[in-house]
Amino acid sequence: MSATTQSSGVGRQGRNAGLITDLKYRWPARYRASWAALVVLLVVIVPVTPRALSGPSVELVTALAGVLVVAALGQMLIIMVGALDLSVGAIVSVAAGVVVHYGGENANIPLVIAAAVVVPVLLSLLNGVLISVLRLNPLIVTLATFGIITGAIRLWTGVSLSVTGRAPEALTSFAQPALGMVSAIFVYALVIAVLLILMLGKTRFGQRIAFVGSNRRAARVLGISVVRTELGTFALAGLLYGIAGVLLAGYLGTPDVQSGAVYQLATITVVGIAGAMFGGGPANVASVVTAAVFLQLLDQFLALLGLGAGSRVMVQGFVLVLAVGAITMGQYSASGLSRGLRLGGRRSSNPASDHHDPLPRARADEQAISTSSLNGDRNDND
């Protein structure tokens, strides 16, 4: 009876250890950083500025966080294939500009929204061709397209994007409602995030995105069309940028040419806080959602404290550096700790090899050298 109980206890411990190992593999520490940061921020906000958690404030934060989630998911895909997109702000502004410029009276609103989504797809695909096919530097390419697109928008529509500068009423009625204190845009963003999780985990194309970003050469050896995968990733990112621009236009009601500019740094910061590796490889969608909420809530908290827009952008930059640095140091620390534990396990498994002398091997070698020297001296004397 006792043997059966002991064996069942050992089996239960083995299953628990297996579950913990599986959790650590699927949700490593770098993905948990954004969740921890959000919890810490909430603990600070409650006693300092409880107004940040009031109804109107939460609705504003969730609305802007929803737009940021969609745009950051596009940036996440680009980073997963080992690139970086600095043109995201301009592409989001293009989508908002198409909606406002062509969504006037008697306009076919569904067709206008479709065009506002297709144009960002084409622009992002152009980035993909320059980066994946011509192998140009992603930073140079996307920074150049950011400047070109921003200047083209000003020439095309002016600062206010149209004569009235207003988004279609049908779009504002879709983007501005709230479910309780949570904006409808955040709900739409959650739906998009779930669909992206399913795509990345259940489809062949989604699984290839992380594989290509992890090792482009190995992916090619295994028969994966690397260029096609990367171009598809850029197109999908452009689709997300377009959706973000449409939702932003609908929520703001009167966007301008600079409305999307904040997403150039914000999306990179969110993906960095979410634990994505900027050299390419897998990323976590849920952590991106949490990081977007954290960053938008932090911005609202700082605004209520009286900080200006420039100061808040500086804080975003500091947060990005701290997040990437903390995640990198955490990985090195974890790897060092695991090596130490493995080394300790080997020593404990072979206790006969341990001696009280801290340098047994060095002293043995020294003794052997002395013996050989003595023998040599004897031979010389003989």
Image: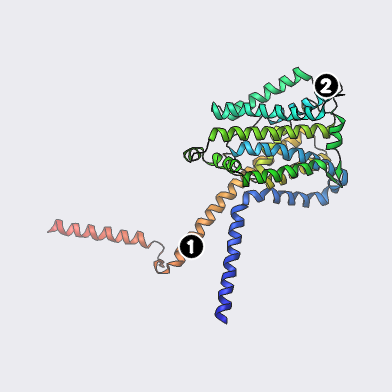
Quadrant (top left, top right, bottom left, bottom right) of the C terminus: bottom left
Residue 358, quarter of the rendered image: bottom left
Identified at 50% across, 56% down, the residue is 339
Could you say where residue 377 lies in the image, as x and y percent from the top left?
A: 18, 57
Identified at 72% across, 46% down, the residue is 290
Q: In this view, does 143 lie to the left or right of 215?
A: right
Identified at 68% across, 30% down, the residue is 121
Could you say where residue 42 lies in the image, as x and y percent from the top left?
A: 78, 50
Who is closer to the viewer here, 125 or 25? 125
Q: Which residue lies furthest to the top in this view?
A: 155
Residue 263, quarter of the rendered image: top right
Which residue is identified by label 1?
Answer: 344
Secondary element under disc 1, as helix, strand or loop, is helix
Q: In this view, does 288 lie to the left or right of 100?
A: left
Could you say where residue 90 lies in the image, as x and y percent from the top left?
A: 71, 27
Q: Residue furthest left?
A: 382
Which color scheme is applied?
Answer: rainbow
Q: How crowded is mark 2: few (under 14 residues within 10 Å), some or many (20 or more)?
A: many
Q: Which residue lies furthest to the bottom in this view?
A: 1
Which residue is identified by label 2?
Answer: 162
Secondary element under disc 2, as helix, strand or loop, is loop
Q: In this view, does 342 lie to the left or right of 121?
A: left
